[in-house]
Image (tube, rainbow, N blue to C red):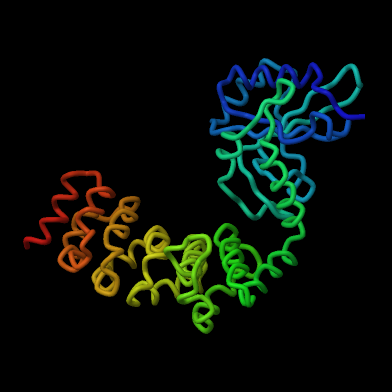
Amino acid sequence: MARAVGDLFRQVFTALDASGTPWLVLRGVGPFAGPDDDVDVLVGVHVRGSLDAAFARTPFVRVPPQGSGSHRFPLRVREHEFRAYDEDGDVWVDLDVLSEVSFGRDLEFRTDLAPELLARRRVVDGVPRLDPGDEAWLLVAHDLLKRGDRFSRGVAACLTDSDSRVRAQALLFFEAFPEAAGAELLVPMARTRRGLFAGVPNPFAPSMDLEWQLLRSIGARILRNDADALAFGYACAVEAGHAQPIIAALTFTDPDWVVAHAEAIVTANPGVAATLLNSLQRSSHDVGAVGARIAPIAVRDPKFQETLELLILDESTRRRILDGLIG
């Protein structure tokens, strides 16, 4: 028998509505839910105290995390678990409140999809639910990715497929899931089989080629501090024409190295100067000083000053950079 929206859950849903936090039911309530299913709710950005305040008006109380990712819906935030006693059924019922979409047997493939899913939610019988299109692909992705290494290594085999569209999709997969098994092959591919990607049209970004996507996917591994990807990134940053897809990731991950080699990077790739400085704003480095050093080189890019105006919002910092052109 399917579980309807009983009084316990109505109290929770009313409390979530009153909290002002966007939310939706992922599973456990509705025509496809079994009577013994846990109920999973996806919520928007919040602080821990706000959830406790909302649930204080319901019979549910917070409990310590009870399980691992292997048996759950493909989402994660294990600290938000609540439980209540259902007197009518003489059973305990569980409710998990989640704020992050993750996949895999151990929920190791993390994403930032939650805001998009919440933005597209639909109200069905008075309850916010996933958009039907999102529900379909989410369940397919969960079913595939819960198979773990076997699936992602199958994707890695597609990196050398004769169809460039298949290669492109494999690269996009590893950009989204840079820690998946098989992603370690990206750097060796870039070192030894670049011809599979260089100059090959990218069906998902027509102005770029597949080499650009390959480097972007390696950039995602740089952001995870992968040693091989970092070593490759250092070499790639000072190669003419190859720094653009990885410079932001490299600057976020190792700003000290980028600052020390800023002139060499911009000499080889004048077009990355503004992106480099923009990314450097998140570090403790003096962006104005670094910018003044590289400005005489960066000006070889005709769009440098225009892009600088868009990315460096602090006027005094921008002026110090442009003063480097005079000096």
Give above or below for 33 relative to 247: above
Residue 136's spot in the image, x, y percent? 72, 44
Give above or below for 273 relative to 50: below
Q: At x 38% / y 72%, what residue is drawn?
A: 242
Which quadrant of the rendered structure holds the C terminus? bottom left
Query: Which residue is situated farthest in the bottom direction here?
Result: 192
Which quadrant of the rendered structure holds the N terminus? top right
Residue 190's spot in the image, x, y percent? 50, 77
Residue 42's spot in the image, x, y percent? 65, 34
Q: How many marks?
A: 0
Query: Which residue is situated farthest in the left direction here?
Result: 327
Residue 195's spot in the image, x, y percent? 50, 81
Q: Quadrant of residue 264?
A: bottom left
Give above or below for 26 relative to 321: above
Given residues 132 and 277, the one toward you in this image is: 132
Give above or below for 26 relative to 267: above
* Residue 62 appears left or right of 227: right
